[in-house]
Image (cartoon, rainbow, N blue to C red):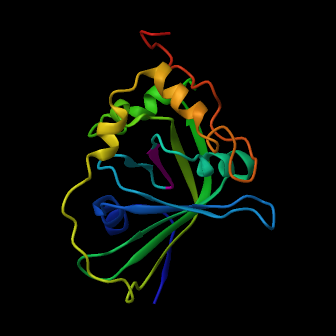
């Protein structure tokens, strides 16, 4: 029923790039730590970097659980499922790293996302994931659903923020600088991008 892949290419790559939504799962090392599962769905915010590496844009929100877990242990699973067409579920298990705005790699990584405006969504980091296991399963139990369009609420909320006000927004939230379990999350104040006109 399922198959393991050596690389992200061909029909596998075409499938994951065609899906309008994917999910990320992370967890802390502590036995009683809070497991996190998040949907991601802004068009153009996911990219295949090479045959074993993918990345996605991490936008503003009221938590930073994924960042905190990756800073502690790097473990992450990404999942796509077919809501239209033949049934399929694809999972990439791997090691992830948040690349922050002041990292020398950040601006180059942004060039891999030419079809979305990261600043309109309050970009915090680029999450880079190196695959250790790539597999699919049948997806027979996933229902048919249709994609209409992206919501514009996130963009409308954060496009009016500049770097200073975005940093203040994050500082006011209880689970941005620290995770729910007290792990270090997004470094604050928010780092300015290298070469930024404001900094």
Q: Residue furthest right?
A: 31
Count the numbered circles shown. 0
Left or right of 125 in this view: 36: right
Q: Using the rendered view, name the quadrant where residue 104 is placed.
A: top right
**At x 79% / y 66%, what residue is drawn?**
32
- Picture layout, residue 2 above or below residue 4: below
**At x 46% / y 55%, what residue is drawn?**
51
Left or right of 145 in this view: 92: right
Percent coordinates x, y for residue 185 in the rendering: 66, 41
- Picture layout, residue 40 above or below residue 115: below
Quadrant showing the N terminus = bottom left
Task: Look at the image and tell me whether residue 105 can be seen.
Answer: no
Q: Which secondary structure type mostly characterizes the magenta part of the structure?
A: strand
Q: Nearer the viewer, residue 99 or 11?
A: 99
Task: Look at the image and tell me whether residue 147 can be seen.
Answer: yes
- Picture layout, residue 94 above or below residue 118: below
Percent coordinates x, y for residue 172 in the rendering: 58, 34
Region in magenta:
52-57
Percent coordinates x, y for residue 193 in the rendering: 49, 20
Percent coordinates x, y for residue 98 in the rendering: 59, 41
């Amino acid at each position: 029923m399922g198959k393991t892949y050596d690389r992200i290419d061909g029909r596998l790559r075409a499938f994951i790039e065609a899906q309008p939504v994917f999910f990320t799962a992370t967890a802390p090392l502590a036995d009683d730590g809070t497991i996190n599962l998040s949907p991601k769905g802004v068009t153009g915010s996911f990219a295949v970097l090479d045959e074993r590496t993918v990345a996605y844009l991490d936008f503003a929100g009221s938590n930073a659980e994924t960042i905190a877990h990756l800073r502690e242990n790097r473990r992450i699973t990404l999942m796509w499922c077919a809501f239209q067409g033949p049934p399929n579920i694809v999972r990439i298990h791997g090691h992830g790293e948040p690349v922050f705005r002041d990292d020398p790699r950040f601006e180059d990584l942004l060039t891999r996302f030419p079809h979305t405006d990261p600043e309109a969504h309050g970009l915090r980091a680029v999450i880079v994931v190196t695959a250790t296991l790539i597999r699919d399963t049948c997806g027979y139990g996933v229902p048919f659903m249709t994609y209409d369009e992206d919501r514009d609420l996130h963009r409308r909320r954060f496009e009016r923020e500049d770097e200073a006000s975005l940093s203040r927004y994050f500082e006011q939230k209880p689970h941005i600088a620290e995770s729910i379990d007290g792990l270090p999350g997004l470094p604050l104040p928010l780092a300015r991008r290298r070469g930024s006109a404001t900094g």
